[in-house]
């Protein structure tokens, strides 16, 4: 008889514990459930991208609740070019979505942007004020999704040396850059990532340009190819790109 009573007590206690645990779980789920989302956006991010992120998060609502892990996973999947995405739980059934964009470096063809991550993404990621302060380059070949470390280093050096301030930069490929002189549009430099017109090379180009101008030969366009060691190959006709060398 005593054994039966002990067993009954045991099951009663177990049932109470189970019921208490289930009750606590329901209470905690109600207290901790994420029902409201707030946002902290990088100011560089465009209104278009902010709206796209908010719409995507709204699609993840289920039974008037959000799962933090699911929100995080989906945002990382759909917006892989965003530099940082955090979803932070807050009191009162809230969570904050924090979005940080990679810093833009150069505009490409007015439609894309090279970022600090060496990635090339559409310019609609960024607010207009962020785009307006960037140097711009033209690319005649197909735009890739990233650049090599060597190309990135060359572009960063070009910004540091103020090459974009003096020249309009156009790229055929990594080995052929055309830099049209803004002060003398009839003169263009042909270079590559390893032969940028800086230091003594820039001074030598200025010297050659002045010699051409002194001789009065400025009725046609000229190109100064500086990709060769210790020399500048100067050519003319069609901007110097296909014509006679001197």
Image (cartoon, grey):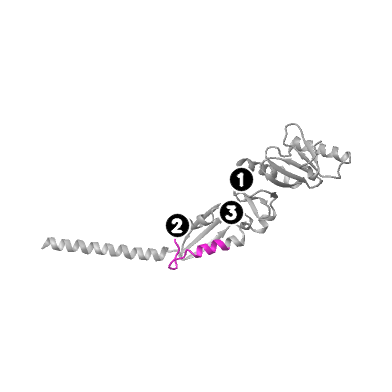
Q: Nearer the viewer, mark 1 or mark 3?
A: 1
From the image, tell me which residue sits under label 2.
69
Boundaries of the magenta span: 51-68
**Does the magenta portion include 60?**
yes
Tell me if residue 12 is in the magenta stretch. Answer: no
Q: Is residue 29 left or right of residue 193?
A: left
- Circle 3: element type: loop
| Mark 1: few/some/many CA within 10 Å (<14, 14-19, 20+) | some
As helix, strand or loop, the secondary structure at mark 1 comes to loop
Marking on residue 49: none
- Mark 1 vs mark 2, CA separation in Å: 32 Å
Q: Which residue is mark 1?
A: 147
Asked which quadrant contains residue 201, the reply is top right
Q: Above or below — where is 226 with respect to 33?
A: above
Quarter holding the C terminus? Answer: top right
C-alpha gap between disc 1 and disc 3: 18 Å
Q: Residue 85 vs residue 130: left or right? A: left
Are discs 1 and 3 less than 8 Å apart at CB?
no
Of circles 1 and 2, the one toward us is 1
């Amino acid at each position: 008889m005593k054994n039966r009573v002990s067993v009954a007590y045991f099951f009663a206690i177990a049932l109470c514990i189970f019921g208490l645990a289930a009750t606590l779980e329901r209470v905690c789920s109600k207290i901790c459930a994420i029902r409201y989302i707030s946002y902290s956006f990088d100011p560089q991010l465009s209104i278009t991208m902010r709206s796209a992120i908010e719409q995507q998060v709204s699609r993840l609502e289920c039974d008037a609740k959000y799962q933090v892990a699911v929100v995080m996973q989906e945002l990382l999947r759909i917006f892989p070019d965003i530099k940082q995405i955090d979803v932070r739980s807050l009191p009162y059934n809230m969570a904050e979505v924090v979005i940080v964009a990679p810093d833009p470096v150069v505009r490409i063809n007015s439609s894309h942007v090279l970022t600090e991550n060496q990635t090339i993404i559409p310019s609609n990621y960024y607010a207009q004020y962020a785009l307006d302060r960037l140097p711009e380059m033209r690319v005649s070949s197909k735009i890739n999704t990233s650049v090599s470390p060597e190309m990135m280093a060359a572009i960063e050096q070009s910004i540091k040396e103020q090459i974009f301030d003096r020249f309009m930069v156009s790229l055929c490929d990594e080995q052929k850059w055309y830099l049209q002189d803004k002060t003398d549009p009839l003169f263009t430099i042909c270079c590559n990532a390893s032969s940028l017109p800086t230091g003594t090379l820039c001074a030598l180009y200025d010297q050659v340009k002045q010699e051409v101008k002194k001789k009065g030969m400025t009725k046609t366009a000229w190109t100064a190819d500086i990709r060769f060691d210790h020399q500048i190959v100067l050519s003319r006709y069609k901007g110097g790109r296909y014509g006679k060398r001197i």
